[in-house]
Amino acid sequence: MKLPILILGIIVVIIITFLTLNYFLPKNPQAEINGHTFSLYIAKTTSEQEIGLAKYKTIGMSQGMLFLFAKSDYYSFWMKGMHFPIDIIFINGNKVIDIFPAVPIATNDALPTYTTKGKADKVLEINSGLTKNYKIKIGDRVNLSL
């Protein structure tokens, strides 16, 4: 009789431990647009935003970097130090408001900037060509889990 109670107690402890760890462990930030999910690197600080994806030689096809800003504004991006071309997606709230597809790496000292036409509070950078491949367009909903 004591053995089933002990087993039940162990099962309860395992379940509580699993649920607690699952709740408190950091989640993998993700963005879902048009049915496609991207695992995210997050650029929150000014320093992280200045470096951006330039610290990586490549990223996976289902990865991206999300830039979070405290307020909606007209933000500009450049390709300083980048090693690979990207698509730049400007987001306000949960909607895509502007896209710069296939932005090439900078090949000389001239660094063009890419500025949104409308105010944005987030920017998502993904591998070049993915907005075209996944048919991501202005007005698409962006679902974030951070």
Image (cartoon, rainbow, N blue to C red):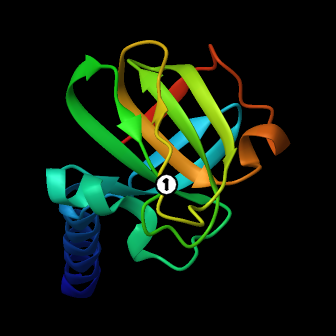
Of residue 39 and residue 108, the one placed in the foreground of this image is: 108
Residue drawn at (43%, 69%) of the image? 81
Disc 1 marks which amino acid? Ala
Quarter of the image with the N terminus in it? bottom left
Residue 13 is drawn in which quadrant?
bottom left
Where residue 141 appears, x then y in whole percent?
57, 20
As drawn, 10 above or below 146: below
Where residue 44 appears, x then y in whole percent?
21, 49
As drawn, 96 above or below 135: above
Residue drawn at (23%, 64%) of the image? 25
Give the residue furthest to the front. Answer: 109
Where residue 54 appears, x then y in whole percent?
42, 68
As drawn, 90 above or below 94: below
Of residue 105 and residue 66, the one placed in the foreground of this image is: 105
Name the side, left or right, on which 26 lies relative to 100. Answer: left
10 Å neighbourhood of mark 1: few (<14), some, or many (≥20)? few
Residue 5 visible in rendering:
yes
Give the residue furthest to the bottom. Answer: 3
Residue drawn at (57%, 22%) of the image? 98
Q: Which residue is mark 1?
A: 110
Secondary structure at badge 1 equals loop
Residue 42 is drawn in which quadrant?
bottom left
Of residue 117 and residue 129, the one placed in the foreground of this image is: 117
Name the side, left or right, on which 31 lies relative to 34. Answer: left
Residue 146 visible in rendering:
no
Q: How many marks?
A: 1
Quarter of the image with the C terminus in it? top left
Residue drawn at (25%, 62%) of the image? 26
Where residue 40 appears, x then y in whole percent?
44, 56
